[in-house]
Image (cartoon, grey):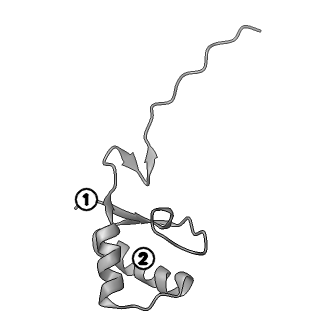
Amino acid sequence: MARMYVDCREMPNEVGCSLRISGEPEEVLKAATAHAVSVHSEKDTPQLRDEIRSGMKLENPRTEGGFAQVEPTPMPATQY
């Protein structure tokens, strides 16, 4: 199954939160709901869960954990 994510920076929030949560859709929904309740003082309602679901985005399949996988560039040889 595809990994999804939600990012507080992409949602309106008054606390300046920058948390990003990624994983399987149900994991993200559960963790993001708990986060919204504990940090953003939201109430756990069906509307909140719908907002979180609609804000989920597909994580780029070419990245792992949101960071691009890039082959290391070899350092040029130096002569001593």
Q: Is residue 11 above or below residue 32?
A: above
* Earlier sequence position, callout 1 versus callout 2: 1
Instruction: Say if 79 sits above or below 17 in the image.
Output: above
Q: CA distance from mark 1 to mark 2?
A: 17 Å
For image coordinates 22% across by 62% down, the residue present is 1
Q: Is residue 66 above or below residue 21?
A: above
Front residue of 37 and 59: 37
Q: Relative to 27, is 21 on the left or the right?
A: right
* Number of the label disc, if any, that sits on residue 74: none
Q: Please name whichever residue, 45 or 63, is drawn nearer the observer in this view of the structure.
A: 45
Name the residue carrying label 1: 2
Q: Amino acid at mark 1?
A: Ala
How many numbered discs sit on the rendered protein?
2
Q: Is residue 74 above or below residue 63?
A: above
Looking at the picture, how far across and down is residue 77, in whole percent?
64, 13
Crowd rating for badge 1 (residues with CA inside 10 Å; few <14, some 14–19, many 20+): few
Question: For residue 7, what is the image quadrant?
Answer: bottom left
Q: Residue furthest top?
A: 79
The C terminus: image quadrant = top right
What residue is disc 2 on? 32
Q: Quadrant of residue 31?
A: bottom left
Q: Amino acid at mark 2?
A: Ala
x 44%, y 52%: residue: 66
Q: Residue at (56%, 82%) from the top-left corner?
A: 39
Q: Nearer the viewer, mark 1 or mark 2?
A: 2
